[in-house]
Amino acid sequence: MDFLTLLVLARLLTPADFGIAALAMTLVATIDMVLEVPVTQALIRLKHIDKSHLDTGFTIGILRSCLLTTVILALAWPFAMLNGDPHLALIVAFMAAGPAVRGLVSPTMTHFLRDLRYSQTVIIEVSGKLFGMTAAILVVLNGGMYWAIVANYLVTSVAAVGISYIVSPYRPAISLARLSDFSGFVGWLSLSQTVAALNWQGDRFLVGVLAGKEWLGRYAIANDLAVLPTQSLIGPAMQPVMAAFARINAEPERLRLAFVKTMRFTMMISTPACIGIALTADLLIETLLGPNWQEAAPLLRLLVLSVMPVPYYQCLYSLGLALNRTKTIFRLNLIDLGLKGLLLPVGFFLAAVPGACVARILVSTSMVCCNALVVRRLLGLGIRQQLRSLWKIAVAITAMIVGVILLRYALRPAGLPALAELLTVSAAGAALYGATLALLGERFRLNAL
C-alpha cells in the first residue's frame, strides 16, 4: 500500500512538492525518534505482565505524546524560517499529530506479540494504511498538492490506533506504579534512539538546506524506494524475531543458531531485491514515476546499495534488545553518527547529492565490520562463521549480476519499452538467482527459522 501510494503521488506531484513534505517529515521524524519510548519492547521482555504494567505503559505513552507535540510545535516556526518557507510551519504542526496519536496504541497488543500471534497486527497495519492511502488520493485529486502526503501520514496513524482498541480492547487508566520496570530498559535505548534519529534524518537536513527542495524531493523518493526491501519485507518481521530471541536468551547455543538462521534468511530475501533495484534503477524510475523523476535514478542506484546491509543490523538490533544490551546498540549508533558526520559533508562538497549517496555507501560498509565484531562479542560467533553462512547467497548474487548486465546489453539494440525490459530482466534475474541457490543445495523451507 505504501508502494502504491508512492506511485500515485509521484505521478501527480512534483519533486518540489515531495521536497517540502520531506522537509517537514524530517523534523517530525527526528523529534519522534529522539523522544521515542520503547514501551512495547520493554513489556515484551518482562516475564509477567499485569494490568498495572499496561497502565504504566499507557501513561508513559500519554506523557511522551504531550512532550512530543509541545516540542514540535515550538520548533515549527523557527524551522520554517530557517528553510525560508512559512508554509512549513503549518505542515509540521499537522504532521505532529501523527506520532502523538501513534504513541497511544492499545498496550494490550503486547500480549499478542509475546505469544507470536500477529493477525491483530496485520489488521491494524493494513486498515490504517488503507485509510491513509484513500485519504491521500482524495486530497491530491482535489488539488491538495503536498497536503496529500500529510493526509496519508496523519490518517494512517489515527486509523491504526483507533482500530487497535477494537481488535485488542483496553480500559485506559493513569498509573506509574510499575515505572521501575521500564526505566532501566528505556535509559540507554532512548539515548540510542536520539543518536539513531540524527543518523537516519541528518542526510535529509543536509540535502534540504544545501541542495534545495527539488533535489530533496528526488533524494527522498529515491530513498523511499531504496528502503522498500528492508523496511517492508524485513522490518515487520523483526518484532517477532525479537520476541523469539527473548524466549531463548538463556540458551546460548540455541540463540546462536537462531541468529545465524535469521541473518541468512533475511539477507537471502533482501540482498537480491536491493541488487535488482540497483541494476534496473533507470527502468524502475521511468516505468513507475515518469519523466519528471529521471534525475532520481542515479540516486536510487547508490542509495539502495547503502541500505543493503541494513537487515544484518536489524537482526543485531533485535538480538541486543532480547539480551538487554541497549548500551551496545547506543554505541553502534554513535559510531554510525560519527562516520556520517565526517563523510556526508565531504561527499556533498565533492559531488553534491550523488557524493552524499556515495558517502552513505562507505558508512554502511564500515558499519558492517563494526556489527560483525559486536555479534562475535555477544554470541561468540566468529566473523568467518558469519561469512560462511552467507557464501551461497554471495555466489548466487554474483551470478545474477553478471546475467542481468549481459541481458541488458543484449536487449539494448531491440529498443524495448522500459516496462517490457524491466519485466524481462527482473524475471531472468530472479530465475538465475533462485536456480543458482538450488544448484548450491540451498532449500527454501517455511520452517527454516
Image: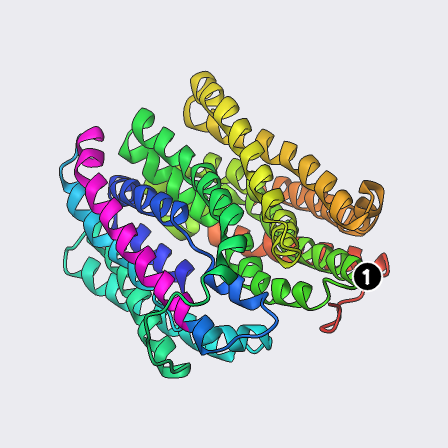
Q: Is residue 411 in view?
A: no
Residue 196 percent across, percent down from the top left? 48, 42
Residue positioned 25% across, 39% down in the render? 16
Residue positioned 53% across, 46% down in the render? 188
Q: Name the residue beneath numbered marker 1.
A: 442
Residue 21 percent across, percent down from the top left? 27, 45
Q: Which is more toward the observer, 435 or 379?
A: 379
Residue positioned 83% across, 43% down in the render? 382
Q: Which quadrant: the N terminus?
A: bottom left
Q: Which quadrant: the C terminus?
A: bottom right
Q: Amino acid at mark 1?
A: Glu
Question: Is residue 226 rendered to the left or right of residue 406?
Answer: left
Q: Magenta region: which residues?
A: 55-83
Does the stretch in magenta take in 378? no
- Colour scheme in the image? rainbow
In the displayed structure, would residue 375 be above or below residue 213?
Answer: below
Q: Is residue 200 in view?
A: yes
Question: Is residue 138 rendered to the left or right of residue 36?
Answer: left
Q: Secondary structure at mark 1?
A: loop
In the displayed structure, would residue 75 be above or below residue 124?
Answer: above
In the displayed structure, would residue 143 be above or below residue 48?
Answer: above
Question: Is residue 174 rendered to the left or right of residue 379?
Answer: left
Q: Residues within 10 Å of mark 1 (few under 14, many from 20)?
A: few
- Residue 211, image quadrant: top left
Residue 259 percent across, percent down from the top left? 73, 57
Does the stretch in magenta take in 79? yes
Residue 338 percent across, percent down from the top left? 53, 28
- Secondary structure of the magenta portion, mostly? helix
